[in-house]
Amino acid sequence: MAKKLAAIKIKNMKVSICIPSYKQTVYLRRVLTSIHEQDFNDYEIIITDDTPDDSIKKLIDEFDFQGRLKYFKNQPILGTPENWNEAIRKAHGEYIKIIHHDDFFTYNYSLGEFVKMLDDNPECDFAFSSSLNLDKDFKTLNQHCPTPKELDLIKKSPDQLFFSAIIGAPSATIFRNKKTIFFNKSLKWLVDMDFYIRVLKNNKNFIYYDKPLISTVDAPNRVTVECVNDKNIFIGEMLFVLKKISHNNQKDLKFLKFLINNFITNGITSIPQLKQYNTKKIKLPFVVYVSFVLSRIYVIFFKRKYSSI
């Protein structure tokens, strides 16, 4: 099938490629093939599997990674994102390279470039690249590529990630294996953004590579789609993350405007309704109530259900 690799020592790998898996064997085959094609070979592969059957195990048995692939069946299943954390916990490499089962390396030099970013910049704990966004048939939709202005924003304050997916999917990142910061298992939608903020607050230095080293696939049943369509998740997690960062941004009008637009867009018309979506049962910061009042004034004054302001 894929090219056979020369036998190598397994200990002290430079990078651990962590693949949290759940079904989707067609896509997982693509990512494993892309790993086999990499020029950089100093890696181990950690697959943690939430799939109820043995389809993932049967698939990986088709590949020969010369003992570098380590497979773990989760019993019981862990769910997203704890499955991601489990792969990280089992990783022994100097660096962690998460890649979701429905994403893959764009080029045969992708992994080497990811590793080089951290090797060449020891002051950085975190690096990421742009990425290609593909449809389910692997046709290119667009390229996720942050602007220089956006990069400057998160250099100044990682909290700016609250407004936009500047970094992109976890598959587009690599970070040092310090095992001190994990993905918040209580989140589903904003789990990656919350993780990025905490990592960059711990060390603001990061490296960005402008070529799309990763391709992400708009696969069926992707968690992002489920979350955006569920207001309990969408709004509840927005409020949860806002609570953690609001004390540092009390004078930032962008937060006020962002909340106003979201309250109008999602049709939140009463405090009880707002509290209903507060699924994490946090004490809402003052800026949330101010934003809600302003959103109602805006709607009543302009007699509109929605308008971006």
Image (cartoon, helix red, strand yellow):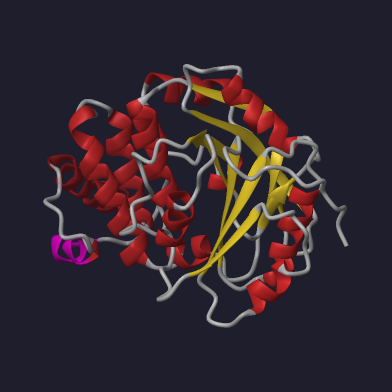
Q: Which segment did they paint magenta?
A: 269-276
In the image, residue 60 lies at what x, y percent? 70, 67
Residue 302 lies, with reference to residue 175, above or below; the image says below
Q: Is the magenta stretch mostly helix, strand or loop?
A: helix
Residue 236 visible in the displayed image: yes
In the image, residue 198 lies at what x, y percent? 34, 36
- Left or right of residue 23, residue 79 in this image: left
Residue 206 lies, with reference to residue 99, above or below; the image says above
- What residue do we see at 76% from left, 44% from top? 106
How many numbered circles does the render carry?
Answer: 0
- Left or right of residue 285, residue 221 in this image: right
From the viewer's side, name the closer residue of 198 and 272. Answer: 198
Q: Quadrant of residue 246?
A: top left
- Left or right of residue 85, residue 207 in this image: right
In the image, residue 87 lies at what x, y percent? 49, 55
- What residue do we see at 73% from left, 43% from top? 8
Q: In which quarter of the image is residue 159?
A: top left
Residue 225 lies, with reference to residue 131, above or below; the image says below
Residue 303 visible in the displayed image: no
Quadrant location of the N terminus in the rendered image: bottom right
In the image, residue 295 lies at what x, y percent? 26, 48
Quadrant location of the C terminus in the rendered image: top left
Is 271 contained in the magenta span? Answer: yes
